[in-house]
Image (cartoon, rainbow, N blue to C red):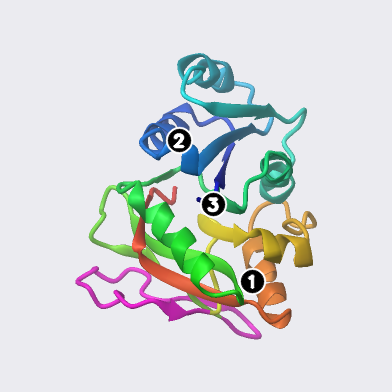
Amino acid sequence: RPTVGIIVLHWNNYRATHRCLESLCALPAKASRVYLVDNDSVDGSMDRLEAEFADRGITFIRNGANLGFSAGSNRGTRRALEDGCSHILLLNNDCIIPDPAGIGRAVELAESDPRCGIVGGKVLFWPETSRIWSVGGSIGPLRETFAGHGEIDHGQYESVTETGFVSGAFMLLTAGVIERLGMLPEEYFFGYEDREYCLRARRAGFRLLYQPRAVVHHEAG
């Protein structure tokens, strides 16, 4: 089975990251590896997390400075690829995976189409999980649009579809798209790196797909 390297970036937020890691520990160990990357937290939270999750199969990576989202996450991505991971899942630390099978469904969708480069899921607000945060979207010349943002989820986005944008809150990348495009653009400290990467992927001929059965709860704080 394909192995997913799940990259979680942490910075001074013990509560959210702990909640995220607890949800990830329910995933099948042989199908995924979790990489917790610390951007030089100064509140002792990384020490606490490493002590509490030391025997849970998580790889801990410490950056010597706050590198921002792209550069910080890229450290984890490089390590995951070196470890032989066939897919990379960028997951915000304030996210929860309520159903462990969801990540497998995202991987299966990516594997079903050789042109697929990125897969996104149904991202719902947390704790108000009946409300949609993102189900994909589009990027125009002036701004991006999150499909369904703020809507109550009543099953209106239950079909696998092609999309123009996948949020970095839950972004599954294939090794093929990383080989072609490289890592996230590090010119951005935080924000818009996912927009640019999606644009580059589409221009390179990759498809971006939405998998509604990959559900994510996102605090979005």
Q: On screen, 84 above or below 124?
A: above
The kind of secondary structure the magenta stretch mainly shows is: loop
Mark 2 packing: few (<14 Cα in 10 Å), some, or many (20+)? few
Q: Residues within 10 Å of mark 1 (few under 14, many from 20)?
A: many
Q: In the rendered image of this protein, does residue 123 appear above or below residue 49?
A: below
Q: Quadrant of residue 34?
A: top right
Helix, strand or loop for disc 2: helix
Residue 29: mark:
2
Residue that carries the numbered disc 1 in the rendered image: 198
Image-based side of 38 in relation to 218, left or right: right
| Residue 31 is covered by the magenta coloring | no
Q: Amino acid at mark 1?
A: Cys
Q: Position of residue 93 (x, y in %)?
A: 49, 41
Residue in the picture at 67% in, 58% down? 175
Q: Which residues are magenta?
A: 139-163
In space, the residues marked 3 and 2 are separated at their CA atoms by 12 Å
Instruction: Give the alpha-carbon distance from disc 1 to disc 2, as whole Å.
Output: 29 Å
Q: Nearer the viewer, mark 1 or mark 2?
A: 2
Residue at 66% over, 48% down: 69
**Coordinates of residue 14 in the picture (x, y in percent):** 48, 27
- Relative to 55, is 156 above or below? below
What's under tag 2, amino acid-wise?
Ala
Q: For residue 93, say whether it is visible.
A: no
* Label whose residue precedes the other's in the sequence (1 or 2): 2
Residue 89 spot, x, y in % from top left: 55, 51
Tag 3 or tag 1, which sits nearer the N-term? Answer: 3
- Please tell me whether residue 152 belongs to the stretch shown in magenta: yes
Residue at (77, 27) in percent of width and height: 64
Q: CA distance from mark 1 to mark 3?
A: 22 Å
Q: Which mark is residue 2?
A: 3
